[in-house]
Each structure stands twice: as C-alpha cells, then as structure tokens.
Amino acid sequence: MIAKALWHTDKFNSVIKPETLLLNTNQKLLHSKYSLISTGTERIVAKGKVPNSLLHLMQVPYMGGSFNFPVKYGYAVCGLDELGERYHFMHPHQNKCAIEAINLYKTNVDLPAHRVPLISNIETVLNAVWDSDFYTNNLKIAICGFGNIGSLLAVTLKLKFNVQPVIIETNEWRLQKAEKLGFEVATTTNKSNYDIIYHTTATQAGLQYCINHLNVEGQLIELSWYGNEKVNISLGENFHIKRLKLISSQVSKIPLSKQKEISYQKRKEIAAEVLLHKQFDELISDYINFENSPAFYNDLRNGNLPNGLIWMIKY
C-alpha cells in the first residue's frame, strides 16, 4: 500500500513523498481526515532548531528520519477506519497511517472530525490550568499571547472553569478576534498587574512583560517552547522582591498534584468533553489542503503566515 507523507528535506524545503505502508496484524489502517499544525514547535523542527540535548525527547510517535534532516514530523491527527469510526492519534502529516491499537483514542462523545486533532492541545491547556493556583477566588488572570495555545486556553478557562482571563496581545488582528469572542483585551502598554499570567508567545519581550506585571507572589505559567533560542530576561526589579513563581508547563507529564485522580486516558476524555462546544470552531483560521502543505511550511519558516490562530491540514 502506498501512502503520501510530508517530509522536511532540509531547513529550507518541504515536500510530499510516497512511501510504502506495511500493515501488521496489531495495527489498524486509518485514513487521515485532519491533522493539527502546531505552528510553534513545527517551525522549530522545520528550521532545524531543535537543541541537540533534546533530540531524543522531541521525537514523536511514527516520526521518520531525524531532526538533522530529512525528517517526517507532525502532531495530532483525526483518522477514520474502514467503518468510518473517528480516532485521535499522534502521527506525522500523512494521508494513510498504520497505527498500533495502544496508540489510538476513540472518543466517548460525538466530537466532529475537525475538532478531534485539538484534543492534544487541550491536554496541554488542562496541564497549564492544573499547574496554576487558579482555584483561589477573586484572582486577576491574564493570558499573554492569543495564538493557538493562548486562544484554546482562553476559551477553556471560560467554558469549563468559569474564569474570564484578560487577553494581552500586540497583534491588532488577534486583539480584535479575542474581543469578538467576548474577552477583555489589553496591549503591552497596559500597566495592570495580575495574580496569574499564562505566557504563550515564545518571545523574550512577552516573558519579561509577564514578570514585570505580576502581583506579589504571582504565578507565571510558561507554556512557550524556545528550542535552541536563548532568552535574556531581567530578574532584578520584580522577581525576588515580589516572591514571584515561574512555573514551566507542558503536556508530557500530568502535574504531580493531579496524578492520583487524573490518568492520561482521563485527561483525553476531559479534553474531548471540553471540545464539544462550538466556539472552538471560531479559533480555526484555515484548512490547508494536504497537497498544498509544503508551501504552507515555507511560509511558516519565513514568518509569512497570514493572520490566524489555528491551522489544520485537510486530506
């Protein structure tokens, strides 16, 4: 059986290549419908900026090649089996996939196919919420950066946790989008301080803004990943005197405080239930035809993407 897969051949080019798909008795054949583009991480991979120290940790299920190129890399996929049943799984961008049963998740709820790939990023969002002390009443909470993760986090906080975060952004289009979705918005000229800030911009300036705008014993939940880029921040003015907390948050491990009650399977179930709300559709900016995906990745590398929040590949 021949499948088609997206490969990054070097730090400048991406192509779709045919490859032979071998299906063993422990695998299920899935026909991809949608796959999520994780723009931050995939830009780093496509530009060859994965740190040498993280080459092993950054590997994903069914990845091909290596981070030194060529590499077949991707994120969350919704695929259909021969009966038309929808599954969530992790796999590089590819039109047909042979997946071990243990790597498949079939939702217990009737989730539309185009929202199924978002389960992975909602798991990231849930970890960030659990990493913070948002349960305390009357806290001022903000999200710095209204991109893929920032927008999903904002809508999840509002719909599931009844929290109304302030959205801090420098991009005018994203500010207007957040406002249309019903959020209070602010630019980085805003002088307000917050008890919790979730940072998602993956920029030095954004991180410094967050440090400078927390209340005493405030929490900065860092969701950004910087690859091999170094960040130079000042900790002299506010960090120590305010007893600030800088907390890293990512998806691979559930916070210790939640591990007794939340399994990885349970986290996926919660994520799928969160995504039942139609407002998440408003965060998807475009569906990229699979055959056109190499051009999209060239724009991603060069910082030439149009205004948007979340992009999906459609097969």
Image: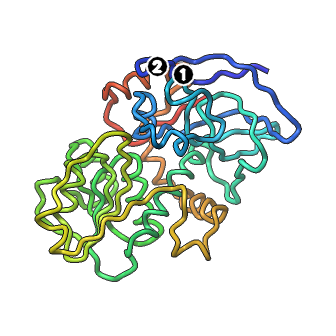
- Res 216 quadrant in image: bottom left
Picture quarter with the N terminus? top right
Residue labelled with disc 1: 70
Front-lying residue, 275 or 204 = 204
The CA span between labels 1 and 2 is 6 Å
Count residues near mark 2 (Cα–Cα under 10 Å), then give few for <14, some for 14-19, many for 20+: some
Labels 1 & 2 near each other (Cβ < 8 A): yes
Q: In this view, does 296 lie above or below 155?
A: above
Q: Nearer the viewer, residue 65 or 101?
A: 65
Q: Tell me what residue is drawn at x 20 percent, y 46 percent.
A: 170
- Identify the residue at image location x=24%, y=54%: 207
Q: Where is residue 223 in the image (x, y as percent from the top left)?
A: 38, 55
Question: What is the number of callouts on the image?
Answer: 2
Residue at the disc numbered 2: 10
User: Few, some or many C-alpha atoms within 10 Å of disc 1 (few <14, some 14-19, many ≥20)?
Assistant: some
Residue 8, compared with residue 280, is above or below; it is above
Residue 88 position, x and y percent, is 66, 47
Q: Residue 280 placed where, x, y %?
A: 47, 52
Q: Position of residue 24 (x, y in %)?
A: 85, 34
- Write the residue at 25% across / 61% down: 184
Look at label 2 and name its amino acid.
Asp
Local secondary structure at mark 2:
strand
List the single residue furthest toward the front.
53
Lower sequence index among marks 1 and 2: 2
Q: Describe residue 216's horizontal placement relative to residue 138 as left or right.
A: left
Instruction: Say which of 307 and 197 sits in front.
Output: 197
Three-letter residue code for mark 1: Pro
